[in-house]
Amino acid sequence: MSSQTQSVTILGTGSYAPTNIVTNDDMAKIVDTSDEWIRSRSGIGARHFAAESETTSDMACIAADRAIQAAGIERSDIDLIILATMTPDMAFPSTACLVQSKLGLPNVTTFDMQAACSGFVYALSVANAMLLSGNFNKALVIGAEKMSGILDFEDRTTCVLFGDGAGAAVLSRETTTEKVGVLGTICGADGTTPSLLQQPAGGSAMPASIETIANRQHFLKMNGKEIFKSAVRVMGQASTDIIEQQGYTSEDLTLVIPHQANMRIIDSLAKRLKIPMEKFHNNLDRYGNTSAASVPIALDEAYRAGRIKSGDLILLVAFGAGLTWASTLIKWK
């Protein structure tokens, strides 16, 4: 008689990108740049920008509904919602609560997760643990961002890199005869260098004022060179650690879905892990860096393109402001 175990599997995925596609040539009309300059430094060719009236919660709801539909369940089956974002609709209430209301799911346990670009993988890790606790059955995990709202369109080194969008996954706790779904997760952080990537004003340290607005301190600020070095190092280590923790090697991986920040980072990660680029799913050229939405958008895209099937071993890995990093290994059911 085979033994049974509790597994957390992904039942369905969904994603959404605003209809407004902004090419590099479009960006060149706004800031001193060019298609060649952007592509050579980042690999980005275009990005989606939300309409002024379109919010993070609006995008999250569309991605969530698509994930629920793909999972073949009803909205009412969801009993946990975790939303990863660093561009909430407002400081409070949480954007997850706004999504809960829009989806018509009163009393469902709901909260935001803020780990910047690592947010979705962090949220997936927390959802996995909460489901395995036995207190929840099905979780809706979302990564959604309206990055265009915090970009300084006078800073060509940052404004060309980011885009808007949302991705979601429905996770379910199931009794299985072998461990499938989320095999393990790793989350880490190093808060000693917050100035490498931050939005300085708007919080308790620097409340909004005429001065902070005039000094453009409500926009994203980034030290690209230092972020690049840190990203390759921590994503490489997080990937190696989760693969070894679960008793696999890099050769066992079917697909790697990294945070979509910069193609040079992804190229360097592939070389460090000795994994061919053919095993990476990249959509950076069409979306730019969508922060917490990048991994779930890429996951949904890869699944719908037929790149993921039952039994495949999938690595998700991300890094973000904080600095934060996270990885998870999934055996697709």
Image (tube, rainbow, N blue to C red):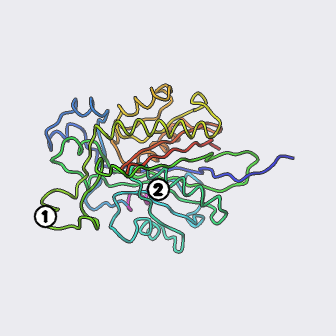
Residue 1 locus on image (x, y percent) = 87, 47
Residue placed at 49% from the left, 29% from the top? 273
Residue placed at 50% from the left, 67% from the top? 110
Q: Quadrant of residue 289?
A: top left
Residue 104 locus on image (x, y percent) = 49, 70
Q: Quadrant of residue 264?
A: top left
Residue 24 locus on image (x, y percent) = 23, 37
Q: Secondary structure at mark 1?
A: helix
Q: Which residues are magenta?
A: 57-62
Q: Amino acid at mark 1?
A: Glu
Farthest right residue in view: 1
Residue 132 locus on image (x, y percent) = 65, 58
- In the rendered structure, the answer to whether residue 180 lies left or right of residue 167 reads right
Who is closer to the viewer here, 131 or 215? Answer: 215
Q: In the picture shown, does residue 170 fall above or below 238?
A: below
Say which residue label 1 marks.
Answer: 211
- In the rendered structure, the answer to whether residue 224 lies left or right of residue 295 reads left
Residue placed at 57% from the left, 60% from the top? 139
Dot 2, how many residues are within 10 Å of its Cα: few (below 14), some (14-19), or many (20+)?
A: many
Q: Amino acid at mark 2?
A: Ile
Gap in Å between the C-alphas at discs 2 and 1?
Answer: 35 Å
Q: In the picture shown, does residue 68 fall above or below 43?
A: below
Q: Main secondary structure of the magenta part?
A: helix
Q: In the picture shown, does residue 131 fall above or below 15?
A: below
- In the rendered structure, the answer to whether residue 36 lies left or right of residue 172 reads left
Say which residue label 2 marks.
Answer: 142
The quarter in which the C terminus is drawn is top right
Dot 1, how many residues are within 10 Å of its Cα: few (below 14), some (14-19), or many (20+)?
A: few
